[in-house]
Image (spheres, grey):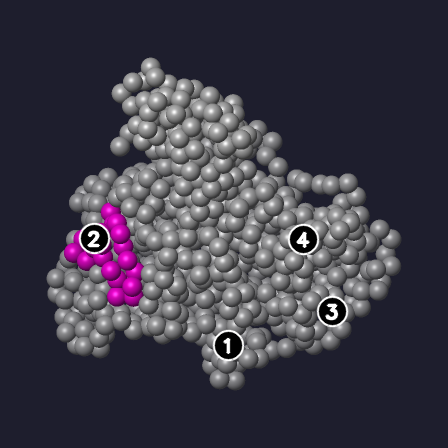
Amino acid sequence: MAYSVVGKRLPRIDAPTKATGQAMYAADMSLPGMLTAKILRSPYPHARILGIDASRAQKLPRVKGVLTGQDIPRVKYGFTFRFPQFCDEYMLAVDRARYLGEGVAAVAAVDEDTALEALELIRVDYEELPFVLDPEVAMRPGSPLVHDLAEQNISVHMSHNFGDVQEAFRRADHIREDRFSLQVQAHAPMESHAVLASSDPSGKLTLWAAKQSPFRVRYALSRTLEIPEGMIRVIRPALGGGFGGKGEMMSLDFCAASLARSTGRPVRIVYSREESLCTTRARHPMIVDLKTGVMKDGTLLAQSCRIVSDGGAYMSSGPIATYVATSHLNLPYRLPNYRVEAYRIYTNKQPSGAMRGHGAPQPRFAMECQLDMIAEDLGVDPLELRLRNAIDSGYVAPNGYIVPTSGFKETLHRAALASRWEQRPTQNPNRGTGLAGYTFLCGNSSHLWDTKGAMSSAFVTLQENGTVHLVTGASDIGQGTDTALSQIAAEELGVNLEDVNITAADTELCPLDWGTGGSRVTFQAGNAVRGAAREARRQVLEAAADHLEARPEDLELVDRRVYVKGSPGKALDLSQAISLAMVQASGAPVIGRGSFNQNAMLPDFGTGMGNMSFAYVFGTQVADVEIDRETGQVDVRKMAVFHDCGFAINPLSVEGQIDGSSIMGAGYALTEELERRDGATMNPSFLEYRMPTSLDTCEVISGLVESLDPGGPYGAKEAGEGLMVGAAPAVANAIYNAIGVRINELPITPEKVLKALEGRGD
């Protein structure tokens, strides 16, 4: 079908303000009388807090407020309050500090220098406690307990079994068992964490916060501050990236709000780069033991998986990461018999939380690498092995995942063609090509979270001048969803993109939206916006129908005009039609409301059964690498990425997501790791934390496969997190193709490459 606005390569609506430096981020904002706050952090990975004396800091001139764990309500925080067992963290340490860098006190002063000086005057009496940093060691009897009630330091345990795994292994012609180790990766967005909080004389709080999910932060603040949600407003200014790391409430949000209330003055907290890297959240490191049984032609029969993930000191979103890790191995291949045992372990380290892919990249790395190993064992082409096992539309996985549409096979074929797979290097010992498949979800059911209403909702108001005001709670964190949602509204209402003005991510002005995470915005918020626009469109067409002496269903709304189908001369300008609708409604504005909360089954964490999402995306990534055998340096020369996005609302944005995800995945594969020693992070800056830069980027061939999902707006699915999932195994498989040595531990550094070559005798 031909569309006027959706499906077009249109520039992002926020591009001019960002390109010219006019965009206002939380750290840029200030208010009269504003104070600067800083947080005092534990110097120990595990210590009992015997006492805190802040009297000297309180007496320091220009200090206006001090906050310690003794001053806060005894309400523990968790990623979701729906399950109390997942709430284990105070916003400042109360009795014990459980990781090096955990906040124990906060100071608000008239300037940053005074706040830092005041931190040095706070005396904290600690009793150092034994600590544990290795998750497998932490599980052993007698290891120090991070939380007293967590036996063997297990924060989450899931055990799921589908089919008859034991019998399937007996029937298998070939079985492989391998261990894979995945490191801790930092979100490292360009914008650090920041918040500005203000309290008015009534006690009402307003926060301008670098957050992906303002409504969830409002709810968490209400619970932990013990004040009504109606007394809290959270506004998301321009946001410079999040990747999952800005989805939760954190200490800075709580401390800024508390200090603003106690001092009566605005309070701003901006984390240093070191604080953002070392004290917020990070990707779960995982150890994956994978056993797979196949027939001699490569048909998958059974798989047994054991996952141990390092959760750090607190729960965060650990249950979701654990479930996604266990469940996503059911796709994109037919796997009739499957069992998994997954443990998330407390350690005395920075907490692990949601990060792009949220538990999916780690086991996917293991499976895609092992599939290549199995292909070699059987003498089968890795591409052919995947094609033999790839799912089709309508597939129902053993764990209950329902796949309305799948373009996975097409992505395999097109990626192979674009990368010239059949001509991949066989003679050049330094060049290699590898591929990997991937899958991800398109949002999840609201029943998992604290929201009682729709996961997404939107308002559309038609102005008498023919312009459109879109109001959505969804949060654009740099991925371009404000533009995509505006395109949807424009398409439905027959206007141009520039005719749509958007207000987003303000808990007081916007309707409820769960926020940005789980690749849900285009699918879920897009459906809500489309519903709201259609409701407004209906009102206009009904009013115009009387004037044009036609039925509403016989009218078209295109190019800012309402006309009778087949008789374009019989028409009204959109502004005229809107005025007629307002007259018919006694002057009431033309407003459409839309919401989306399609019923997906809440997964049963006990059995693993449940359809977590409304749709699933699929794709294939092919990496071309070159290796210097003298230095061990790996250079990713090219990546071909073919993604089943359902329908591309804005192909330009989707291609941008493909480029960014590919480079981020290459960094995960080769360079990125928070290096820790005795609980301390040894590379706490962008100088030392080795993300790929513009000099490290490679050519990326983007390909969009449009499977047109029946539940998505215009058939759209996600195009963000899934793109990250297949990059690392594609690079690892390419490295093996180049040097014939398999490295199962990320990142694949030059040192590991050289060691592997030495072990082989090269």
Residue annotated with mark 2: 392
* Disc with the residue nearer the chain's start (4 vs 3): 3
Which residue is at the front of the view, 553 or 528? 553
- What's the CA distance linking mark 3 and mark 2? 57 Å
| Camera-side mark, 1 or 2 | 2
Instruction: Give the secondary structure at mark 2.
Output: loop
The residue to which callout 3 is attached is 70
Q: Residue at point 29% right, 50% down?
A: 618
1 or 3: tag closer to the N-terminus: 3
Residue type at mark 2: give it: Asp
The image position of residue 124, as x and y in percent, is 75, 69
Q: Which residues are magenta?
A: 385-407
- Residue 650 in the magenta stretch? The answer is no
| Residue marked by disc 4 | 231
Q: Label 3: few (<14), some or many (≥20) within 10 Å? A: some
- Residue 745, compared with residue 238, is above or below; it is below
| Left or right of 627, for residue 258 | right
In what element is the residue under mark 1? Answer: helix
